[in-house]
């Protein structure tokens, strides 16, 4: 049976923490654009910890369960961390290629977007654009996922570490779908301010929900196979690191809401195909079995065979 009290308090605390931080940049319209951007990024980074804080508060004071029930002391099978690290890179690449294939953007190997950005910085024009692009790519696929993981853990401790398990009495597919919808809706204030789908403040909210359902299904698959929020946090950190890399290779005048990033519909195709493969290969839904080891009992995720 779903623990309605715990779920209700989790959602209330999550939104009470995150949404004011998401909306706070609207109060600073008089700031210089650069300063406002920095403040916005800082506030939104703090908001990412809303679900995690809510999970901790609800677990300790509402459900009165031990902190260990959030499974931060669990890692699970290590191979899923490779999926978490590299799958977002592949999905982003697929989305970028489909953006070109569908004619949403045009390839620009002169890196006009980077050149224009660097021209406004002191001494920036002297740095070759290709060097900057290469440096950004290397950082995005190596260190950035692990740096971003520290912020993404705040979300994943809540969405996958708390919300998903508490929805499991509904059935695995329903739990994944509902948690994805809630995760997508949680982004509403930032989407309406132009994040991910600029120019589409209302449609963008629904697009974000679709994106979060698809991506959340993949994150849930990783979580259910490890029972650890760390794997979802790494995947989330990797997504945030590489999400916009294809844009570096496109001419600036394209509709970013529909292509170029992992949140755009062009990338949904790769995610949907991967989920279809998981279902076809009977890797999703995931069934956890208990096996006895020398150290005691532990959960061993298995593929559902029927």
Image: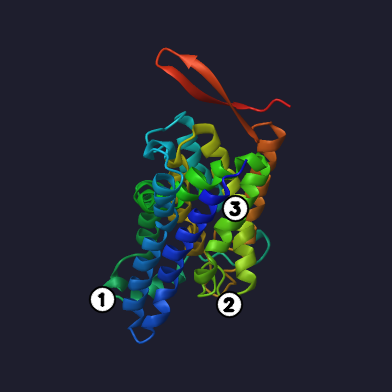
Tag 2–tag 3 contact (CB < 8 Å): no
How far separated are the C-alphas under marks 2 and 3? 23 Å
Residue 180 is labelled as: 3
Kindly state the secondary structure of the residue where label 2 is placed: loop
User: To which quarter of the image does residue 103 belong?
Assistant: bottom right
Q: Earlier in the sequence, mark 3 or mark 1?
A: 1
Front position in the image: 177 or 277: 177
Quadrant occupied by the N terminus: top right
The residue sitting at 56% across, 45% down in the picture is 3
Kindly state the secondary structure of the residue where label 1 is placed: loop
How far separated are the C-alphas under marks 3 and 1? 43 Å
Tag 3–tag 1 contact (CB < 8 Å): no
Q: Earlier in the sequence, mark 1 or mark 2?
A: 1
Question: Residue 268, how many percent across, how many down?
Answer: 64, 54
Judged by depth in the image, the label closer to the viewer, 2 or 3, is: 3
The residue sitting at 39% across, 84% down in the picture is 29
């Amino acid at each position: 049976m779903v623990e309605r009290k715990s779920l209700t308090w989790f959602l209330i605390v999550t939104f009470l923490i995150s949404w004011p931080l998401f909306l706070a940049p609207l109060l600073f319209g008089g700031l210089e654009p650069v300063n406002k951007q920095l403040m916005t990024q800082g506030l939104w980074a703090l908001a990412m910890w809303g679900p995690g804080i809510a999970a901790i508060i609800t677990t300790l004071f509402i459900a009165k369960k031990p902190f260990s029930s959030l499974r931060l002391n669990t890692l699970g099978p290590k191979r899923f961390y490779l999926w978490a690290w590299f799958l977002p890179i592949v999905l982003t690449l697929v989305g970028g290629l489909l953006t070109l294939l569908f004619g949403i953007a045009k390839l620009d190997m002169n890196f006009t977007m980077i050149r224009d950005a660097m021209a406004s910085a002191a001494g920036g024009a002297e740095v070759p654009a290709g060097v900057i692009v290469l440096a950004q790519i290397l950082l995005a696929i190596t260190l950035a996922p692990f740096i971003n993981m520290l912020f993404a853990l705040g979300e994943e401790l809540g969405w996958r570490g708390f919300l998903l398990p508490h929805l499991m009495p509904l059935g695995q597919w329903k739990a994944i779908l509902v948690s994805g919808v809630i995760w997508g809706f949680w982004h509403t204030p930032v989407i309406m301010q132009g994040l991910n789908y600029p120019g589409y403040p209302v449609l963008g909210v629904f697009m974000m929900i679709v994106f979060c359902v698809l991506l959340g299904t993949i994150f849930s698959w990783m979580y259910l196979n490890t029972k650890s929020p760390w794997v979802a946090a790494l995947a989330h950190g990797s997504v945030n690191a590489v999400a916009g890399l294809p844009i570096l290779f496109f001419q600036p005048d394209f509709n970013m809401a529909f292509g170029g990033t992992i949140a755009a519909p062009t990338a949904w195709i790769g995610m949907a195909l991967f989920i279809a493969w998981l279902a076809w290969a009977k890797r999703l839904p995931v069934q956890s079995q208990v096996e006895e080891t020398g150290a005691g009992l532990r959960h061993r995720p298995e593929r559902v065979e029927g």
